[in-house]
């Protein structure tokens, strides 16, 4: 065999190593998701009109609360109770600390209960919320963060929600960031039925108000129980994305611009202690100082005392060092792939 032939034969036998192949695929996936959440995609032809229209009508309905005939004390009470239930129990406890960060485990009845609360919030399905949030933590205030205020304060507050994302982008987001959730029957159920819960709560509120005192009361229940409550809930959650990466103080030296902001913590049930959370994402309590009030932590402790929550990660770290330094894809995937116990014996 000639030297040239031998060289050709040898080069044809060279194959990319599994490690290099995985790294290359990871880089391609990262670029795809970076493009999917890029501000450059916010164009008229790429607007998610379902989400945009829903948010518009909820905000428009909120304005009807200024009509005196549509005010009722019962509607106001429903608004306050549902705000706490859907935001603190559904989003903060269920979607965020339980599902996204595994700060605690829940027994099956409690898990179903908090997922219902999360769906009623109207802030997205559990799987979509958790996957997007894990992406945010990996890329926080860097290129690829879905909603960094460094790109723009209005972008981080709500404009990022208006972008329509491709089906393959959503599938990749799920595969990369919530691999342990995609095959869980309960998660699949809520992914399919998310919109149904919104319709059901609207009809229940309308029917309950009508049964109590006619159609005006029914309209009051819908306006205050959904439109006012959801508008307030949306902005209190969105302030966590925007305001707490711009203003406030820092207990920890994180790699991002997260801050602790007291007024966001009050309206968002503890989520405003955002620097604490970004420094130590898997710690269940968000308030790490005695003055940092965290109402969601009170709910977690209540579930823990009743036995519905267990393996709660409640140890408050000491010092200013944060554990958010390692951001490689394999670290995120390793964390996401840790088993999540759905039930206990």
Image (spheres, rainbow, N blue to C red):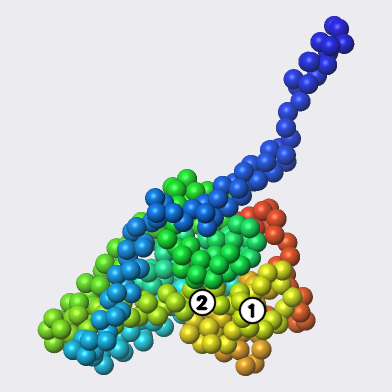
Q: Residues within 10 Å of mark 1 (few under 14, many from 20)?
A: many
**Hey, which residue is sitting farthest top in the picture?**
1
Placement of the N terminus among the 4 image quadrants: top right
Whether tag 2 and tag 1 are in contact, CB under 8 A, the answer is no
Decide if residue 52 is on the left or right side of residue 179: left
Number of on-image labels: 2
**Hey, which residue is sitting farthest front in the picture?**
44
Residue identified by numbered label 2? 239
Q: Is residue 321 above or below residue 175?
A: below
Residue appearing at x 59%, y 84% in the figure: 261
Secondary structure under the numbered disc 1 in the rendered image: loop
Mark identifier at residue 259: 1
Residue 211, quarter of picture: bottom left
Residue 270, quarter of picture: bottom right
Q: Earlier in the sequence, mark 2 or mark 1?
A: 2
Residue appearing at x 22%, y 86% in the figure: 67
Mark identifier at residue 34: none
Horizontal and vertical percent position of residue 328? 70, 55
Decide if residue 183 is on the left or right side of residue 212: right
Residue appearing at x 33%, y 81% in the figure: 228
Give the camera-side residue of 288 and 246. Answer: 246
Secondary structure under the numbered disc 2 in the rendered image: helix
**Hey, which residue is sitting farthest right in the picture?**
3
Decide if residue 34 is on the left or right side of residue 306: right
Horizontal and vertical percent position of residue 245? 61, 74
Horizontal and vertical percent position of residue 198? 31, 68
Structural distance between the alpha carbons of marks 2 and 1: 12 Å
Horizontal and vertical percent position of residue 51? 36, 61
Residue appearing at x 75%, y 82% in the figure: 318
Q: Is residue 36 visible?
A: yes
């Amino acid at each position: 065999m000639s030297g040239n032939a031998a060289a050709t034969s040898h080069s044809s036998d060279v194959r990319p190593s599994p490690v290099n192949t995985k790294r290359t695929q990871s880089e391609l996936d990262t670029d795809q998701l970076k493009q999917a959440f890029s501000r450059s995609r916010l164009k008229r032809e790429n607007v998610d009109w379902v989400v945009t229209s829903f948010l518009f009508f909820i905000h428009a309905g909120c304005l009807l609360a200024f009509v005196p005939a549509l005010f009722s004390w019962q509607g106001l009470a429903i608004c306050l109770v549902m705000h706490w239930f859907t935001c603190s129990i559904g989003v903060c406890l269920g979607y965020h600390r339980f599902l996204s960060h595994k700060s605690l485990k829940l027994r099956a009845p409690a898990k179903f209960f908090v997922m219902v609360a999360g769906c009623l919030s109207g802030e997205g399905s559990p799987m979509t919320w958790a996957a997007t949030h894990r992406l945010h933590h990996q890329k926080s205030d860097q290129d690829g963060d879905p909603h960094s205020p460094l790109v723009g304060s209005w972008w981080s507050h709500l404009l990022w929600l208006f972008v329509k994302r491709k089906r393959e982008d959503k599938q990749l987001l799920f595969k990369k960031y919530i691999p342990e959730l995609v095959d869980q029957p309960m998660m699949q159920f809520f992914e399919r039925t998310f919109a149904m819960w919104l319709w059901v709560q609207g009809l229940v509120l309308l029917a309950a108000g009508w049964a109590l005192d006619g159609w005006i009361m029914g309209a009051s229940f819908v306006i205050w129980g959904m439109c006012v409550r959801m508008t307030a809930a949306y902005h209190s959650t969105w302030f966590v994305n925007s305001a707490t990466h711009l203003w406030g103080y820092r207990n920890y030296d994180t790699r991002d611009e997260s801050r602790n902001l007291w007024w966001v913590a009050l309206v968002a049930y503890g989520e405003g202690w955002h620097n604490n959370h970004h420094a130590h994402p898997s710690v269940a309590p968000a308030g790490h100082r005695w003055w940092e009030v965290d109402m969601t932590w009170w709910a977690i402790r209540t579930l823990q005392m009743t036995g519905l929550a267990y393996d709660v990660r409640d140890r408050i770290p000491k010092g200013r060092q944060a554990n958010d330094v390692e951001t490689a894809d394999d670290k995120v995937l390793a964390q996401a792939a840790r088993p999540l116990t759905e039930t206990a014996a």
